[in-house]
Amino acid sequence: MAELALILLGALLINNFVLAQFLGLCPFMGVTKSFAPALAMSAATAFVLALTAIACHLVHHGLLVPLGLEWLRIIVFIVVIAGVVQFTELYLRAVSPLAHQRLGVYLPLITTNCAVLGVALLTVGEGRSLPGAVVFAVGAAAGFGLVLMMFSAIRERLLGADLPAALQGAPIALITAGIMSLGFLGFFGLG
């Protein structure tokens, strides 16, 4: 149980996929201009991350390893991720058309989100058990969502700030992301 707690803490804070490993920066910079789309993207990505980690773990250990096809891992994982994203998009369109519309092009881009593929590859590459893979994916998804929501809240506050013209838009967003990354660097001693 302590091992699973360390896996969760590590994925959530210590090795945060956005601020420590710099994966998933496209939605981090693109969806975080306001809080509602960041929250929806966090939920959709969390759902996709959890399902793909489980599916990729099962496919890897149940199909690829027994058949000696580990070299197809990346291609198979991309196909699994694309299927899960397609399912998520259809589900969101049916359940919440407004959230689907707000996410726009970023929802299909979860397929190419390197954080999703990174979690799947790290899960099987580090030889995690299925419970460890699930906890790792949940921690990665929670860390991704935490960072997206924090960054969107900061960016909303910065919209009302009196900034020099040279810092408005992308420059202040990149500076803020760098400062957040430095803040998360302080968690490295916990693991």
Image (tube, grey):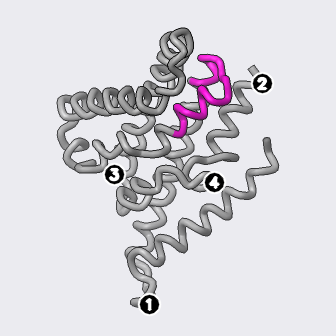
At which x and y percent is residue 47? 41, 31
Q: Is residue 131 magenta?
A: yes
- C-alpha span from label 3 to label 2: 34 Å
Secondary structure under badge 1?
loop
Instruction: Tell me: 37 left or right of 56.
Output: left
Could you say which quadrant of the image residue 9 lies in?
top right
Secondary structure under badge 3?
helix
- Tag on residue 164? 1
Q: Which residues are magenta?
A: 118-133
Q: Is residue 61 above or below residue 56?
A: above
Give the residue displayed 74% in from the left and 32% down from the top: 6
Which residue bears the numbered disc 2? 2
> What amino acid is found at the position of numbered circle 3 in the picture?
Ala
The answer to whether mark 3 and mark 4 are in CB contact below 8 A is no
Q: Nearer the viewer, mark 4 or mark 2?
A: 4
Q: Is residue 185 visible?
A: yes
> What amino acid is found at the position of numbered circle 4 in the picture?
Ala
The answer to whether mark 3 and mark 1 are in CB contact below 8 A is no
Q: Is residue 145 magenta?
A: no
> What amino acid is found at the position of numbered circle 2 in the picture?
Ala
**Main SS of residues in magenta:** helix
Q: How many marks?
A: 4
Secondary structure under badge 2?
helix
> What amino acid is found at the position of numbered circle 1 in the picture?
Pro
- C-alpha span from label 1 to label 4: 29 Å
First in residue order: circle 3 vs circle 4:
4
Front residue of 67 and 47: 67
The answer to whether mark 1 and mark 2 are in CB contact below 8 A is no
Give the residue displayed 54% in from the left and 36% down from the top: 119
Which residue bears the numbered disc 3? 36
Which residue bears the numbered disc 4? 20
